Amino acid sequence: MSKQKLFVICFLFLGLQVIHAQIQIKGTVKDVNNEPLPGANILEKGTTNGTATDFNGEFSLKVANDGILIVSFSGFETQEIPINGKTSFDIILQEGLQLEEVVIVGSRNVRRTAIDTPVPVDVIDVGDLATKNGKVEVNDILQYAAPSFNATKQSGSDGADHIVPASLRGLGPDQTLVLINGKRRHQSSLVNIFGTRGRGNSGTDLNAIPSAAIKRIEVLRDGASAQYGSDAIAGVINIVLKDNTDGVSGSLGYGAFSTAIGDGWAEATGETLYNVEGKNRLDGEDKSFDGGTFKLDLNYGAKLNDKGGFVNFTTELLSKERTLRPGFSWRKGYGSAAIDGFNFMVNASLPINDNTEVYAFGGRNYRDTDAYAFSRDSYADGDNRSVPSIHPNGFTPRITSNITDISVSAGIKYKLENGWEVDFNNTYGENKFHYFIKDSNNASMKDASPTDFNAGGHSLSQNTTGLDFTKYLEDLMSGVNLAFGLEYRTENFIIFSGEEASYGLYDDNGVLMTNPAVQPVAVDGNGEELPGGSQGFPGYGPDNEVDRSRSNVGLYFDSEFNFTEKFLVGAALRFEDYSDFGSTFNFKLASRFKASDNLTLRGSISSGFRAPSLAQLYYNLKFTNIVNGESLPSLLSANNSTVTKAFGIEQLKEETAFNASLGFTYKIGGFTATIDAYSITVDDRIILTDNFDASGLNLGVDAAQFFANGVDTKTQGIDIVLNYKKTFDEHRVNVGLVGNFNDTEIEKINNGNLNRFTFFSPFSEAYLKAAAPDHKFGLNLGYGYKKLDVSLNFTKFSEVQLQDFQWVESPATTQAEADALYSVATDIYESKITTDLSLSYAFTNKITFTIGGNNIFNVYPTPQFDGWTDQGGLADSVQMGSDGAYFFTRLGFKL
């Protein structure tokens, strides 16, 4: 080889080495207001090499000098920037709507509502919130982040202790549709039947979704039945799962509640109280803190190919001890339930080529929960529900449950040559709720009674198959989006029986009662008949078993017309046909007008509907209701039963709604404001009636109640979201004010010929209205400096009025009797303000430590001293909760 050729080869080789040499680059990523974007993703195109910006929007990375940077941040337009040997970059990202993104991602300390949408949308950055507060469940996060979302932990309300009912804009838990990645999520199999928000409703169990798997939550605060179908009367909650591919991240946290509620309660009530100041507790321990909550979550994301394919896994371990708060002798276990749970969630997408993408997501949630029921006195004190040889001093039964929630969704997206995009998807989900009653007895079995019972349970499964077509026409007007599709859904509701001892009533010979005419019921020493079934919660028996299914098909058309850059009109139509009650047709019109670069006006009108759930149609149970410590054998009769028909209750039909909203958005510099007024009327709203006298029906119960299309309601309110964000030098300031005014009125009670007060008493009316406080405001203050972040949040809950159990003890049947009860049975929970404080410090880009407290001044609901509260404590659970101050630490990490 000649020297010349050798020289040329060496020169080319060295040139290639120079071309592919690695260089160290640095830079900043900011928005158009020159404010840094912490957490923006920086990726070297075609590789897995990447990083994220720090709290100041700064980054550094070693890359090939001929590479290309992909810079992205949720809610902003992604940029591709050639490196070309440069070592310093000042990058400005423009806000904009991407295919898989939303206009604005927000949390307590950044802008939260989409400015350019024709209807109000809150976008909650769950990952950001998780680093700044100690809230470990989705309901708790949304309670303080979305203005009109409310979720209240219950106590002594059977299944509602374990699955927390939640509502949007003061409507029922089943009037808000939940989606995951835009696909319909199944509901819980639990129907709330005791004194709780959402009585008679079956909502979606948001806490079954691990918060660590969530990228963001989009809360559409507007009726959307015409777009998404049943349940979307109040709005839609869309949970978007994480899709990051930057390896392993996670957190480890622990927190506990203070038991310091103050002395003097026994003197004020004249009763011996339990669980005051952490003493005289039902569990026999003295504690300054209880409700200890441990949470470990891990998230792993990886690329599947160079076309944007990814897979993201999340696991979450949660262990929470119960709390105990002051209660009377018949409610020694007042407090929130204990939970041991494990979550798993996966989200994946695999683009096969430029036109085809296969995707899948799903997971499994398992929870073992434990809550105290109302206490039973000893037989010596006159309570024949206690077996003397087993519980000589009385007992407090525990209602425990195994809740299993599974879901899987898979689909394929394909872009046709003519520009239409097709999405074919199938989603399956199932919720199973299995009761196990512990530390109890079946009094009719006497000494032979077990103390633990398998009480059976229920399950709900749902399968949804959808085919959707969309196309955006850039050259028509200023842009037109068209969409249409169809959906086929099947549902199955099951009640399965428990062991015989959990539901059975036994005769004097210890034989299960099957023929009362020849079998005398077991009696105590005073000749009084002994009650059957497990105390605390009676098991489901063969007579309760249900296995019912239905199907429905839906067709929809959805569109948006940008007549000009400033003026947009959206229209949607939907037809659905159900196999069990018929068909329904709904519409929606929405509009947005940009009055200026800063001011946008928006509004909508729509019709809506909600089909009665299978649980409302077929749920039935014999149970013991507790009224001021006394038992009331009761029957909840299925809607299709002869007993229900005999009382004149008609077959359930769909709820119908009309929704109107009007609002505006304003944005200038770092300040944004959205204000939206709404009005929602719901006719034939499904409720659970009060107790009718059933003592003469020979059913072994004293009272019966039913599901019925019982009331027409009107809900009006205003949502307010104001935010200001400013960065100067290395200081970051965020100020936010979120608020909601809400008022629900019962315009008509559809009692027919039945007594109005027995059908739906003021006791039940109060619970329906108390789904949301009259107003809720949150002032959120954030300050950051370099690696330090401080968050201070004040939340004000309005006064709440409930009616207590005196309405059930002495039911009113006339207006005069009702007027007399109002003066003594009205419980007023005064307006309160809670304060949350947290401090976070990023030791490195991979380690963040947070310490803080929620409700740090230990504010409780106004105590009631007469012992008639629905849940048996000194106070009922209202929106602020009744567990007091919670203090926590959290360590976030990346590997």
Image (tube, rainbow, N blue to C red):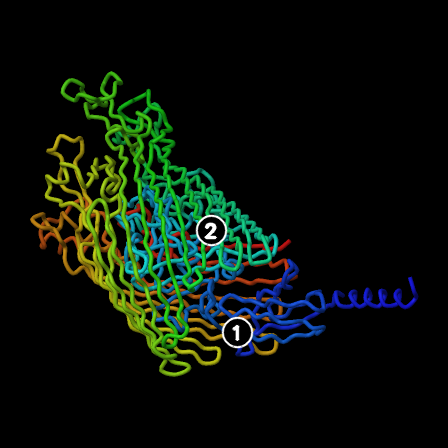
Report how far apart the C-alphas of labels 1 and 2 lie in the structure: 30 Å
Q: Which residue is mark 2?
A: 257
Q: Residue at x 66, y 61 (%)?
A: 844
Q: Amino acid at mark 2?
A: Phe
Q: Is residue 622 left or right of residue 841?
A: left
Q: Residue at x 62, y 55 (%)?
A: 894
Q: Secondary structure at mark 1?
A: strand
For marks 1 and 2, give the one nearer the viewer: 1
For mark 2, does the 10 Å Cα neighbourhood hold few (<14), some (14 to 19), or many (20 or more) residues? Answer: many
Q: Amino acid at mark 1?
A: Val
**Outermost top residue:** 509
> Which image quadrant is residue 446 in?
top left
Measured as percent of width and height from the top left, residue 808 is found at 19, 45
> Which image quadrant is residue 604 in?
bottom left
Q: Is residue 700 left or right of residue 216?
A: left
Viewer can see residue 191: yes
Q: Residue at x 33, y 47 (%)?
A: 873
Measured as percent of width and height from the top left, residue 589 is found at 27, 68
Residue 868 - label: none
Measured as percent of width and height from the top left, residue 586 is found at 24, 60
- The image quadrant where one finds the N terminus is bottom right
Asked whether the residues under the numbered discs 1 and 2 touch, taking CB atoms below 8 Å apart as contact, a structural biologist would say: no
For mark 1, does the 10 Å Cα neighbourhood hold few (<14), some (14 to 19), or many (20 or more) residues? Answer: some
Q: Nearer the viewer, residue 694 or 868?
A: 694
Q: Which residue is mark 1?
A: 733
Instruction: Compare marks 1 and 2 and give the one earlier in the sequence.
Output: 2
Q: Nearer the viewer, residue 2 or 687?
A: 2
**Outermost front residue:** 1
